[in-house]
Amino acid sequence: MIQLIATDMDGTLLNSEKALPPQLPALLEELYRRDITFAVASGRSHMMLTSLFGELAEEMIFICDNGACVMQPHEAPVLHSLPKAVLAEILTQCHNLPHVMPVLCGFHHIYCPAGMEDDLMQEIRRYYWDIQELPYDALFQVEEPILKVAVCNKNGPETHTYPLLHQILQERYELLVSGDCWMDVMCKGITKGTAVRHLQEQLGITAAETAVFGDYDNDISMLQCADYSFAMQNAPARVRECARYLAPSNEDNGVVRQICSLLGLHYSALPKA
């Protein structure tokens, strides 16, 4: 019997318009009635996630910043911040790369360089808000603990950004490609999968009682935590190969449809918000 469901957001629960499924409130009510825990696991910050879910967020579990921030109802958040030295190294390297911008993700604020190209800023604002734009040198002096550095490269991170930062940081930190334009740097061992495993231990839940949904490389560690691991139809082949099952695409409301199938619910009967 499934007791825990964890889902990614972009490319998974959200459609291409970044909208939540209209049936989600009714589905969550049914999950809570059955005492099934529902968690959102995203590379986004908690500010963006809680704002997106509104009142629904009050009783939800959020695995934010790819696991660097975990928030449970009525509990203090669990945070994992990067050392100042590694932040300085990442900022120095990114400053020398064309069309590459670092985004420093704190718990309270997001920091990025001022004067960015319009297309880069537009891409960053798709996923982050409460952004503090600072002169590049001032980023080195940010006092707030930084949970994650998200590196935006409109040309794709795999070719230049990821190899360079991996060569510098080697195996000391987690480096994940999290989107077509994005890669993230976190503390070693901090992933969505680590957060899901801790949640399983806390709840006394096994992989056989867990369902997980994802669509990109940063979801693979999470897919490995569940017997019911679903890659979305729209996921790259390398991600689909890491999952046991395939769910309909995010454009076809695949997460909600698949949960209904798992729990014996009628998708068409779920009321829309």
Image: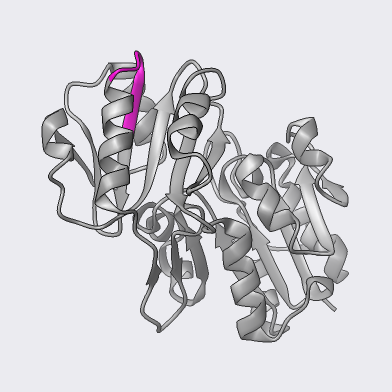
Image: 93 above or below 147: above
Q: Which residues are magenta?
A: 96-102
- Between 174 and 266, which is closer to the camera in this rendering? 174
Image: 35 above or below 244: below
At x 49%, y 19%, the residue is 160
- Between 107 and 167, which is closer to the camera in this rendering? 167
Q: Is residue 120 magenta?
A: no
- In the rendered image, which quarter is residue 239 located in? top right
At x 70%, y 73%, the residue is 4
At x 74%, y 34%, the residue is 234
- Between 194 and 214, which is closer to the camera in this rendering? 194
In the image, taking residue 13 as reference, residue 235 lies left or right, namely right
At x 39%, y 53%, the residue is 45
In the picture, which quadrant includes the C terminus? bottom right
- Between 173 and 100, which is closer to the camera in this rendering? 173
In the picture, which quadrant includes the N terminus? bottom right
Image: 142 above or below 36: above
Q: Is residue 98 magenta?
A: yes
Residue 250 drawn at (x, y percent) = 69, 41
Image: 69 above or below 48: below
Residue 211 drawn at (x, y percent) = 76, 64
Residue 161 drawn at (x, y percent) = 46, 24
Residue 129: tell me if it is visible.
no
Residue 61 drawn at (x, y percent) = 52, 71
In the image, taking residue 10 as reference, residue 74 lies left or right, namely left
Q: How many marks?
A: 0
